[in-house]
Structure formats: structure tokens, C-alpha cells
Image (spheres, coloured by chain):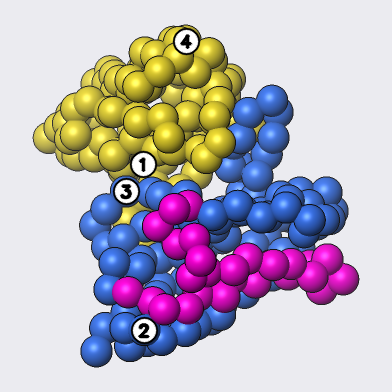
Amino acid sequence: DIQMTQSPSSVSASVGDRVTITCRASQGISSSLAWYQQKPGKAPKLLIYAASSLQSGVPPRFSGSGSGTDFTLTISSLQPEDFATYYCQQANNFPPTFGQGTRLEIK
Amino acid sequence: EVQLVESGGGLVQPGGSLRLSCSASGFTFNSYAIHWVRQAPGKGLEYVSAINNNGGNTYYADSVKGRFTISRDNSKNTVYFQMSSLRAEDTAVYYCVREWYINAWYYDYWGQGTLVTVSS
């Protein structure tokens, strides 16, 4: 199975800040990568698919980039509702596998 | 509105069995594969099992192969997940998830999850 590694594991930031989370795959996955947001006690929510495509209804302050093995999720201006845990997931090889998560906390 | 609703979770002793159900609505159920993804307390997300749209193909993570069985009844818009020989490490919230396949395996809709606790 493909291993996904996220960094950092946690990050503290303030409302209005720009935040970037990275995800690295153990082998090339083309652009087959998704990002999910999970709030405490809730199911994950799909934010971005195909590395950079925004899921319907997701605010444009979220963006994704990358291909091959290195990917990033950027939140351009943090809003209070963005404080959550974010997971990347490779979708190129079966089974799908997830990164360990990045917890975004309020500074 | 797409909805996936899990049920059947609870407390079970090690070695015991449990059957989860996932009831779907708001989409053409027999056109989609369904997966189970679990999350141990305070941990990350882990794919566990999948079933294709007509039930003809099933897939399992190595950690559950031989112990868990996934099935579906398209006449009832329901997926079942029979869990046997349960272990403490199977303790997790189990999510029923719709596969969105666009030349890659994404998860576009998730249920609210059902908690399975394996403990004596």
C-alpha cells in the first residue's frame, strides 16, 4: 500500500493567517489526491479532489496543488470555522490510503 | 439529498460478533460502490472494506480479511458489514462512505459513523 505522510502534525494559527499543509506519497500518484476536513465528532468532508479541484460548495480560500509525490493544501485566510483536522488521501492505487492528519489549532 | 446512515454499533466482548448496516438514500444506490472506513479513538482514517455496485466484488484490508464480510442488498439500498472474531484493536468509529470513482478512488459522501467498542 502507498504510504502518505503529512506535515506538520499540528499547527497553530490565527484568524486571517495563510496556512499550508503538505502531504508526501511513498510513490508517484499522478494528481490522484484528495483533501478532507474533519471537525470533532463529525465525519470527514471532501474539500479537494484531483489535487487541485475544489469540491462543490467549498469556499475558494481553500486550494490544492502538486503532482507525483508532493502535494499542498493552502488556506488563504483562515476563518474560525476552519479550525479542524485535515487529511490527505491518495486515490491512485487501491486501497485508498490516508495521511496521519494535521490538526489546525487556534493560536 | 444524499444520505448514508449507519447503525448496529455497540459494545462487544473480544471474540464476539456485530453486524453493521448502512442505509442509503438520495442517489441511485446500485450505481455506486460503498466502502467502510474506520477511525480508532484519537487516531487517523483507515480503509477497511469495499463492495462494488452490484455486490459481485468485495475487498478487504489485510487487518480484517477472514474476519469481516461486506454485502449489500440493492432492493433495500443497504450495505451490511458482518464483523466476527472482534479484537480490541477493532475499536473505532466505522463510517459508511460512497465511492466517487473518476479514474481514481475518492470519497464524496460519508455517514455520521457508528462506534464499535471491543472490550471485556
Q: Colour of chain B?
A: blue
- Depicted A91 relative to depicted A80: above or below: above
- Depicted A87 relative to depicted A5: above or below: below
Q: Residue at x 32, y 83 (%)?
A: B14
Q: Quadrant of the C terminus of chain B?
A: bottom left
Q: Residue at x 63, y 28 (%)?
A: B104
Q: Which residue is mark 3?
A: B44
Q: Are marks 1 and 4 in contact (CB under 8 Å)?
A: no
Q: Disc 1 is attached to a residue of which chain?
A: A
- At label 2, which amino acid type do we have? Gly
What are the residue bounds of the magenta stretch?
Answer: B61-87
- At label 1, which amino acid type do we have? Glu
Q: Residues within 10 Å of mark 4 (few under 14, many from 20)?
A: some
Residue farthest along the front direction in this orientation = B66
Q: Earlier in the sequence, mark 2 or mark 3?
A: 2
Q: Residue B120 bears which disc, if any?
A: none
